Image (tube, rainbow, N blue to C red):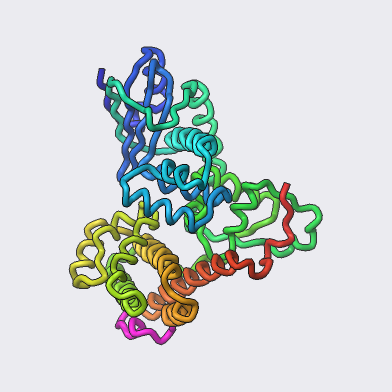
Amino acid sequence: MSLKGNIETFYLASVLQLLAQDKKTGILTIAEKDRIVRVYIKNGNIIYAVGSQKEVRLGYLLRTKGIISAEELQKALALAKQRNEKLGKILVEKGYISVETLKKFIHQQVRDILYDLFLWKQGDFEYVDQEFNLDQEFATELNHMEVILEGTRRVDEWGILKKNIPDKEMVFKINRSVEEQRDAVNLTANEWRIISLINGKRTVQQVIEDSGNDEFSVYRVINSLISSGLIEQGASVAAITSEDKNESPAIIQIYHQVLVSMLKVTEKNVGSRAQNILEEAKAHVPAQYSKFLRAYDCRGDAKKNLKLILESSPSNQELLNGFNAWIFAILHKQKEVFNEEAMAANLKQLTNPAAAWQQFPVKSNLKGTILSSIIQTVEQFQQELDKDKGKGKGILSFLKRK
């Protein structure tokens, strides 16, 4: 049996019910742009699901929950890519986590992947009867009605959450007035993880990416923090709100100069390995941005790079977010091979308001926006360094955990 359609007209709940009633065994694939999810069904029961970003999300989730360190994750990701093996296998092999821990997190991720599907507005699906082998995976058995009920409930709640947080580019900050009520403040572990990322600079989208959690969970926590008065909307990050495509080439040209400068600094410190370091950093850029950065070559011709990126038709804001995400990942790679003195000089050069690219004949507010966003990226990186070193308590030190 083969079944095809679009979830915009043939609802996912109906598809799952049909396959369950007929006790089907096969694979259901749902795809929308660069997102792909495969759901494995045996005798009508859902036993496994995998998304296109499973490996990265699993690693981020383990890191943000404190199961593994950022350094352990980077080492495991690199080894998994080198061997072409699954991240989970590497993490267990290196002794970073136990098999039981891996199993627990994979099962949770399967549920998150399925529930997230219900929030997709559209996507083509195809079901094909076929046998499959999941010996290398931790398959589980999920009742299709429980999945449908929870997915439907999330759709209803999603509408409420979106009213309070209508735009992923919104920025929130800690309400400092809550320090006066410190004895009454209690947070769950998950609320703590999310609020620790809210600093008046990160957008909601960046909080989602940095937390490793699914979009729905982050929206729910942020909504709860808003309702409790712990956070409030901050001033918008200096952002490129205009969708005038005439600005896109200027944005790309400016970031090209910034990246060439970073490449030269890296070459000065590590020699011929520099280009590999910048390329490896792309693996840590969120998928929605890596799609237009994938073929970008800092050593290549600026016009060729410009053409390659514009073929993907990214928005101005996507360009800003994507390049900054790459810069952030490069800084982490540089940290591994630079000494402290070289790293300090690197950060100073990156945030220099008199940098050569400032001479570009483009709108001053565009240059100011880009400089501001680069500075914020460097500040975020510096905060992570300080946190790793245990410096300072920060403005969240007064909050208690449940």
Would residue 290 be counted in the magenta stretch?
no
- Above or below 233: residue 163: above
Indicate the position of residue 133 as horizontal and vertical percent values. Answer: 33, 26
**Residue 242 appears in the rendering:** no
Q: Within the magenta stretch, is there residue 358?
A: yes
Classify residue 43 by image quadrant. Answer: top left
Q: How many callouts does the rendering have? A: 0
Which image quadrant: the N terminus? top left
Q: Quadrant of residue 350?
A: bottom left
Q: Main secondary structure of the magenta part?
A: loop
Height in image: 227 above or below 15?
A: below
The percent position of residue 301, horizontal first and vertical second, equals 19, 72
Which residues are drawn in magenta? 352-362
- Position of residue 233 in the picture relative to residue 6 (left or right): right
Between residues 35 and 259, which one lies in front from this camera angle? 259
Q: Residue at x 38, y 39 (%)?
A: 51
Instruction: Between residue 85 and residue 344, name the one nearer to us.
Output: 85
Give me the residue at 39% from left, 54% from top: 286
| Quadrant in the rendering for residue 39 | top left
Place of residue 233 in the rendered image (x, y in percent of width and height, measured from the top left): 60, 60
Q: Position of residue 263 (x, y in %)?
A: 32, 74
- Decide which of 96, 198 is in the foreground and name it: 96
Q: Residue at x 28, y 68 (%)?
A: 275
Q: Going 42% across and 51% down the picture, which residue do you hit?
A: 76
Tell me if residue 119 can be seen. Answer: yes
Q: Residue furthest right?
A: 183
